[in-house]
Image (cartoon, rainbow, N blue to C red):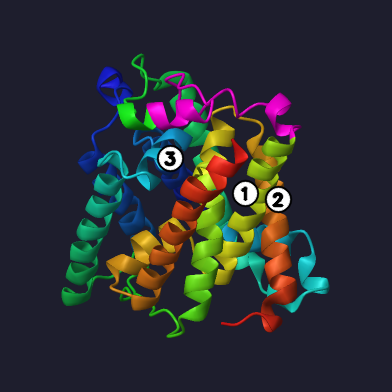
């Protein structure tokens, strides 16, 4: 039963992704062609409000539901993996018009072809795991 | 209320709602990052026996798998009960650009012309869905996160690595949109 809150949060996420149209292949095309403010507005609002609330939680020493102080872990200070990995993900994002979350939301919407995207993305993650030590990070 | 939810949401409501999801997960003592589920599923399927990258306590990530299940249900709820009657308000210039590639705007959330089993079995369909999926799975793990982990969580925490990753996302997306799609269609 401790997992029910995560399912509910996930349901909200699925609805938000759908109603914001962030799962739309069309909207992603529009974004990468700079032909509408829509997606930039969504990401921009999320980032700016996210910066504010993250700062606020740090300043107020916010606690989580278990009473522990909330920490925001810093990412490792490399750059190659972020740039190379980022570009590779970006290529796939524009092809399918979906990042990992929306792939599953679209499956729920009834687009069964997303099953193929899910299987191939698992293969991609597995392949990364195999070659991890040989790749520049 | 339902009628209100049914209409397409303005970008500022959507952006704030995404931040709310991140904050809810933070309050639960977790962090918002969707693509790590792909690694978890590989580990769950036993990949840890062959590849050390998948040899970790995947059960600690069950909460995120539940979030994933919720996302699927959320998509189902949206398409069944929260669907708007108005077509997607895509910009005119995008509609024209897509038309030049023979992709016709149908007003739905994704082009039905592409998102079907028949198209999937064509060379283009395999490239887009199989190839695209592979790049997503490989790239997100290589970069250590996707749009949720880097663009939302990482940038909110002013992480320079996340900014590099997001710049990478855009370089890749621009290459696909402006160099690969014109060759493909």
Q: Is residue B100 magenta?
A: yes
Query: Depth check: B125 or A64 in front?
Result: B125
Magenta stretch: helix, strand or loop mostly = loop
**Residue A61: mark:** none
- The image shows residue B129 at horizontal and vertical percentages of 65, 42
Magenta-colored span: B96-122
Judge whether B162 appears above or below B40 on screen.
Answer: below
Instruction: Name the residue at 39% across, 58% down.
Output: B25
The chain letter under disc 3 is A
Kindly identify which residue carries mark 1.
B132
- The image shows residue A94 at horizontal and vertical percentages of 50, 47
- The image shows residue B162 at horizontal and vertical percentages of 39, 70
**For discs 2 and 1, the disc positioned in front in the rendered view:** 1
Instruction: Name the residue at 45% across, 22% down.
Output: B105
Judge whether B28 appears above or below B84 on screen.
Answer: below
Instruction: Name the residue at 20% across, 57% down.
Output: A49
Residue B31 in view: no
Q: Are marks 2 and 1 in contact (CB under 8 Å)?
A: yes
- Asked where in the image residue B107 lies, by quadrant, the reply is top left
The chain letter under disc 2 is A
Kindly identify which residue carries mark 3.
A29
- The image shows residue B170 at horizontal and vertical percentages of 41, 58
Kindly identify which residue carries mark 2.
A120
Residue B18 in view: yes
Q: Left or right: where does residue B185 sit relative to residue B87?
A: right
Q: CA distance from mark 2 to mark 3?
A: 21 Å
């Amino acid at each position: 039963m401790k997992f029910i809150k995560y399912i509910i949060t996930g349901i909200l996420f699925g609805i938000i992704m759908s109603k914001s149209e962030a799962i739309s292949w069309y909207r992603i095309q529009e974004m990468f062609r700079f032909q509408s403010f829509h997606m930039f507005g969504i990401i921009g609002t999320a980032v700016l409000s996210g910066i504010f609330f993250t700062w606020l939680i740090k300043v107020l020493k916010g606690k989580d539901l278990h009473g522990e102080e909330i920490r925001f872990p810093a990412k490792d200070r490399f750059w190659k993996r972020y740039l190379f990995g980022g570009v590779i993900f970006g290529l796939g994002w524009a092809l399918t018009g979906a990042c990992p979350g929306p792939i599953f939301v679209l499956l729920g919407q009834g687009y069964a072809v997303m099953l193929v995207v899910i299987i191939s993305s698992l293969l991609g993650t597995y392949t990364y795991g195999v070659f991890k030590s040989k790749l520049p990070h | 209320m339902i009628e209100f939810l049914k209409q397409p949401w303005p970008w500022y409501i959507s952006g704030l709602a995404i931040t709310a999801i991140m904050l809810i997960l933070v309050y639960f003592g977790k962090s918002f990052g969707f693509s790590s589920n792909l690694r978890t599923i590989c580990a769950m399927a036993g990949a840890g026996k062959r590849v050390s990258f998948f040899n970790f306590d995947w059960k600690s990530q069950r909460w995120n798998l539940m979030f994933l299940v919720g996302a699927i249900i959320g998509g189902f709820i949206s398409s069944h009960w929260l669907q708007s009657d108005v077509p997607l308000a895509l910009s005119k210039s995008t509609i024209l650009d897509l038309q030049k590639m023979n992709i016709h705007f149908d007003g739905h959330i994704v082009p039905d012309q592409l998102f079907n089993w028949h198209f999937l079995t064509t060379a283009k369909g395999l490239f887009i869905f199989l190839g695209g999926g592979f790049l997503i799975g490989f790239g997100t793990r290589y970069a250590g996160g996707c749009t949720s982990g880097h663009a939302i969580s990482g940038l909110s925490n002013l992480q320079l690595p996340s900014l590099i990753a997001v710049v990478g996302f855009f370089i890749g997306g621009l290459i696909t949109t402006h160099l690969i799609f014109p060759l493909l269609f």
